Image (tube, rainbow, N blue to C red):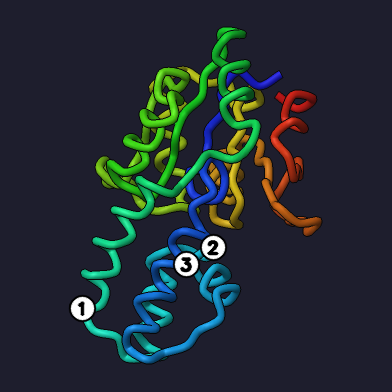
Amino acid sequence: MYNHIIWDFDGTLFDTYPVMAKIFKEALKEKEIEEPLEEIVKQMKVSASSALRYYEKKYHIDNDFITKYKKRKKEAELELSRPYEGIKEICTYIHSTNRKNYLLTHRGESSIQLLKKYDLYDFFSDFITSKQGFERKPSPNAINYLINKYNMIHSESIMIGDRDLDLLSGKNAGISACYFTEGNDKNNYADYTINSFEQLYSIV
């Protein structure tokens, strides 16, 4: 049994990639640039910052474009982003059984706002966002901070995410890693792989 469950945000708790990619595609289209939505999603799943670097290099987009995109994205996400099916139920279950959920994301305050909007905030014991300034995943620093703060036993702790860097941050901290995918792909860094959150009940 896992007593400490650490969650990634984008692509794990919330289905945000389609929203981010749609806004980005629309912004590119205004500059008469056509880019497949699937390719934008693929780049976003590496990380939002690396996606911006990729397209900055590919299309020579400027800071004004990036600033406008980020503003539109922030507005759209708060309106359109939703938690994945089953997230509220599993977070409620973990909380109700006297165990702890934690958030670990590269995002800022928007992650907290969305958790509050969908009545998930109270099921979490702590929140690591960009605000704290920890080294980015796959660095284990943020997880090690949580481990020390809450006296976690490594074997009772697990990181859940949808990308290599999420899983590696967990493995680098010496805890288990669970890979969430909407497909049937596997991940070499995962101790568990799920494609629906109902499957977590048999793990945590």
Q: Is residue 128 left or right of residue 22?
A: left
Distance of label 2 from label 1 (alpha carbons): 22 Å
Crowd rating for badge 3 (residues with CA inside 10 Å; few <14, some 14–19, many 20+): many
The relative height of residue 162 versus residue 13 in the rendered view (above or below) is below
Disc number placed over residue 191 in the picture, else none: none
Placement of the C terminus among the 4 image quadrants: top right
Residue at x 54% of width, y 68% of height: 41
Residue 146, position as x, y percentages in the image: 42, 29
The relative height of residue 117 versus residue 129 in the rendered view (above or below) is above
Disc number placed over residue 21 in the picture, else none: 3
Distance of label 2 from label 3 (alpha carbons): 10 Å
Q: Nearer the viewer, residue 124 or 68?
A: 68
Q: Which circle, 2 or 3, is nearer the viewer?
A: 3
Disc number placed over residue 63 in the picture, else none: 1
Q: Is residue 157 left or right of residue 14?
A: right
Residue under pointer 2? 45
Placement of the N terminus among the 4 image quadrants: top right
Q: Mark 1 or mark 3, which has the lower sequence index?
A: 3
Distance of label 1 from label 3 (alpha carbons): 18 Å
Residue type at numbered disc 3? Ala
